[in-house]
Amino acid sequence: MMLLRCSLLSLTLVLCGGLSVAAFAADPVPGTQPLTIAEPLDKFMINGINKFCLREIEEGIAKREALWKRDYSSPEAYVKSVEPNRLHFKESIGAVDARIPAAGLEMISTVQQHSLVGKGPTYTIHAVRWQVLENVTAEGLLLVPNGAVIGRVVAIPDADWTPEAFCGLQPGVEPQAQLPRRFAEQGYQVLVPTIINREDTLSGSPFVAYTNQAQREFLYRMAFEMGRHIIGYEVQKVLAAVDQFEKLNKDEQKALPIGVAGVGEGGLLAFYSAALDTRIQAAYIGGYFQAREGVWEEPIYRNVWNLLREFGDAGVASLIAPRALIIEACAVPEVAGPHPAKPGRRGGAAPGKITTAVLGHVRKEYDLAKAHYEKLKAADKIKLVSSGEGDKPAGSSLALVAALGALGGPAKEVADGGAPQLIKAPWGVETRQKRQFEELHTFTQLLLRRSSIVRDKLWTLPQIDRKNLDTWAKTAPDMREHVYQELIGKLPDSTMPLNPRSRQVLDEPGYLGYEVVLDVYPDVVAAGILLLPKDLKLGEKRPVVVCQHGLEGVPMDTITRTGEGFNYYSGFAHELANRGFITYSPQNPYRGKDEFRTIQRKSNPMKRSLFSYIIPQHARTLEWLSSLPNVDPTRLAFYGLSYGGKTAVRVPPMLEKYCLSICSADFNEWVIKNTTTEHPTSYVFTPEYEIFEWNMGHLANYSELSSLMTPRPFMVERGHFDGVAPDEWVAWEFSKVKRHYDLLGIGDKTEMEVFTGPHKINGVGTYEFLHKHLKWPKR
């Protein structure tokens, strides 16, 4: 294979608008400018998308307000006006499941041990449990004042703190940050839930492997695919505690104030809980509130779909207004990154760090939040306190006074009653974390098992009518748009000039090859290699096959006949070009490990994904290909391997200019693959932390995505020894596609070829499929 660099020879002009390929020599494709980018195009592309993402995050701050319809005329009008945004936020954190009605707190005791585990000078501490979701409970501690109760507080520790440490029964938390006992000392009844910690002990499965993921990440991965979140689960635990307090108020015929307070990860949970539930009259947030535009650098278990597009921390605070909000800038337990993989465990945990917020970042976001309180004439209801310069422990005297005052307590400095006495560790405390972890794990797996029922209801009448091709054609566009917006995330159509640039890089006996770059958005390009057969005739129109590489691949992998690339791709772009097809091998931006995976991290909070960029890249590519004089714009086909197979069920279904799609070495029961913890092929255990797509389990699996190709042809290529998934998963999922096509009377337009082989292009039935449906004769 001879590589050539662009030497600007004069073009041979031809009549009739045709293209004489032999006349190209080493010039660019006619109608394009010379391509002069020296940097490898994959790096150039990925760097550009990362720049675009960061700019969009910053510019998104000013755009958020357009997504709200606030009415500041009265507190009641305001609360009503932000209710749609509250619902969006509830959906974004996955706090959507119906809670078990409050039936009372359960004291945890045995024949040998009482629920009483500790006591302070004016209160006692009990081990308790309360119901949350189906087969999901919360466990923790209840602090009960000896005298009259003047209010009720849910106090949430950081993920690295146990309830006992947070209360002062165990070491590990600075005395002033022991908020539960400090509230109890002033007459408040306090519930302290256990939250999932950052250890990796439980992160895995005896059926597959254990990993170095924090337990929060392990649960996050599977839950995200189901439209749920570790954050949402634990917010539900907090709100279930509020349910219990509301029941107590009703049973005791009292109207005691209910508040939430938390530090670090607990601060996040208190903050989000108060945003969702207007029964919470006051919230203390320690060490979490700040400008959130850098959330993509935090641990992945803080990755929330749509967070920055619509909210940011000031937007979340505005859901609390005009209720009391106390923000303390303070030190939190810091996280440098994931645990190193221990012997016998897999690595691959997502990078991410937690650092104490810069005070300036806290003040900047606070000013944005305070503006809403001021418009509601409630500026006294929001307060920012700094512990030291924002670097000292939570629970400073000013913060505590403000929190107590917001809950009707003494608005003055109070004495510290000292650490309580530990009587006996709660029953089962050593296995409490495991119980709480396994309940959420089991709940998510139950959602997985039921998810197909939810999808089936979505993909039927009245949303979708499969009676015949006409009814399908009328109802499918709305579903296509819904999937694009809610699962993938849709960017505006590009309005930039294509500005095509090219350079010749190949001269083979049967074809010439050109690197091509097109503009998509500022800093975002589409790139690839165009192969033009040398026997093209003037005025002749031929079909194009877009040949897509997989993970960490480059376009040349689809062309080469040597080396590792050939082992997977079988030189299929080269083979198809020699059969007379024009081929184009795009560079997709899933290359560079964390460099591309952080694109997903930057995009999810903006309600976008990696494919939010890939689809417009392909749209621009098809636009340019359609303009070439020897291309038939009605015969533009797609054929992709592995991650290119992922592309095959996400891009052509959304872009109707693609007349055909072939998914090779990827098609399977994708939702199970991304969520199960019982099969070795599951992504829950691998380094591909970007792979999880928000709520896919309840929106569209591969069969539903593939059905959006209808009435265009769709094919699956599958090797028996492909480790992507078992044959049974592939057959199960494809059977739904086949049934769909059959019932619409176009069963001849979908096929699956299964061959005895591994994860690779087989190029037998698929080539036949291309010749047949692109109406191109075999040679």
Image (tube, rainbow, N blue to C red):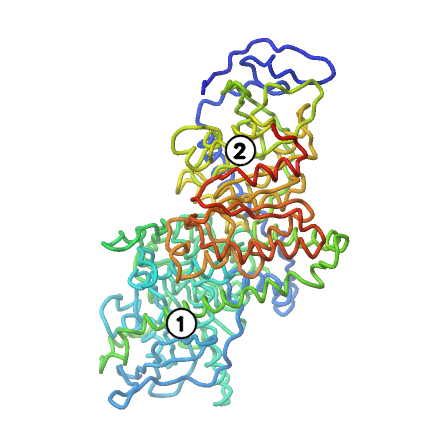
- Name the residue nearer the viewer: 282 or 167: 167
From the viewer's perspective, is residue 749 above or below residue 278?
above
Q: How crowded is mark 1: few (under 14 residues within 10 Å), some or many (20 or more)?
A: some
Mark linked to residue 586: 2
Residue 600: image x %, image y %?
Answer: 47, 46
- Name the residue nearer the viewer: 623 or 638: 638
Amino acid at pointer 1: Glu
In which quadrant is the C terminus drawn?
top right
Mark linked to residue 24: none
- On the image, numbered disc 1 is attached to which residue? 439
Secondary structure of the residue carrying tag 2 is strand
Q: Can residue 602 be seen in this view?
A: no
Q: Is residue 575 visible?
A: yes
From the viewer's perspective, is residue 579 above or below residue 179?
above
- Name the residue nearer the viewer: 178 or 545: 545
The alpha-carbon separation of the residues under discs 1 and 2 comes to 44 Å
In which quadrant is the N terminus drawn?
top left
In the image, farthest residue toward the right: 470
Q: Residue 339 is drawn in which quadrant?
A: bottom left
Q: Is residue 771 left or right of residue 416?
A: right
Q: How many marks?
A: 2
Amino acid at pointer 2: Pro
